[in-house]
Image: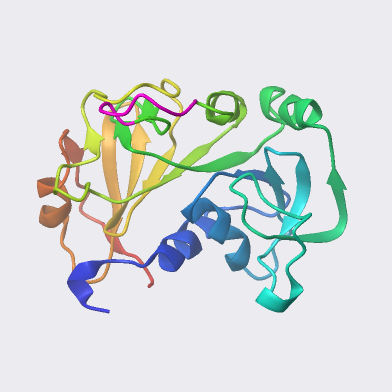
Amino acid sequence: MSERRGLSREQIAKRVAAELEDGWLVNLGLGIPTLAVNYIPEGRDILFHSENGIIGMGPRPADEDVDTDLMSAGKGPITLIEGAALVHHADSFVVARGGRLDAAILGAYQVADSGDFANWRLPDRHVGGIGGAMDIAVGAQRVFITMSQTDKDGTPKLVEDLTYPLTTKACVTKVFTEMAVIAVTDQGFVLEEVAPGFTPDDIVARTAASLIVPDDVGTIAA
């Protein structure tokens, strides 16, 4: 992997998993978030939730062990940990809406420096529904976003104001991209870490909003 390519999807998932604390209940969204279950830090007991009614979701099974009755909300094969529960969809959202999620890891198309984010529809497409992301983001105590720093055309996804349809306002805690870890604070975006091969200036150039750069920016352990 070239240094300038940044982190892989698996490395992003591993980095966001490092934020999870012992005893937390964590919702996993679609895409990169589902990989986080494979990177639970040693010694931490974390319970994973999937909106389709799984509490106690385990890592992806080996291909020969796939059970097509056990799928995540993103229709990917999963395992169950000991003591896991399969619940009605409505009960699953009682967990989300009731503030019982310590964190949610979600994907996004854009994040604003106010903590607003958009993850359900691109402006030029008139298909798809918002799904459960709105409820999950509102109910979770922390929202961690995994996404690319820019789109395929190089347009920054970290912005001052959303131009994509809103999912939830003022809820994002941190953003994890292939280039950086960026916190969302009352003062706006704050750069915490950069991926190997990148500098703070690289991240500033790929962010369409003010980015606070402290003196002690770290490097992501890839």
Picture coordinates of residue 48, whole percent (x, y):
70, 50
In the rendered view, does 125 fall on the left or right side of 213? right
In the rendered view, does 24 fall on the left or right side of 159? right
Query: In the picture shown, does residue 67 fall above or below 173?
Result: below
Q: Quadrant of residue 165?
A: top left
Q: Residue furthest right?
A: 83
Picture coordinates of residue 103, whole percent (x, y):
59, 40
What span is in magenta? 122-129
The kind of secondary structure the magenta stretch mainly shows is loop
Give the quadrant of the C terminus.
bottom left
Residue at x 49% of width, y 64% of height: 14
Picture coordinates of residue 1, whole percent (x, y):
27, 79
Please name whichever residue, 22 or 154, is drawn nearer the observer in this view of the structure.
154
Query: In the picture shown, does residue 177 fall above or below 219?
Result: above
Please name whichever residue, 88 or 24, is drawn nearer the observer in this view of the structure.
88
Regarding residue 123, the answer to whether it shows in the image is: yes
Regarding residue 40, the answer to whether it shows in the image is: no
Picture coordinates of residue 215, whole percent (x, y):
20, 53
Query: In the picture shown, does residue 220 fall above or below 120?
Result: below
Residue at x 31% of width, y 59% of height: 178
In the rendered view, does 89 fall on the left or right side of 3? right
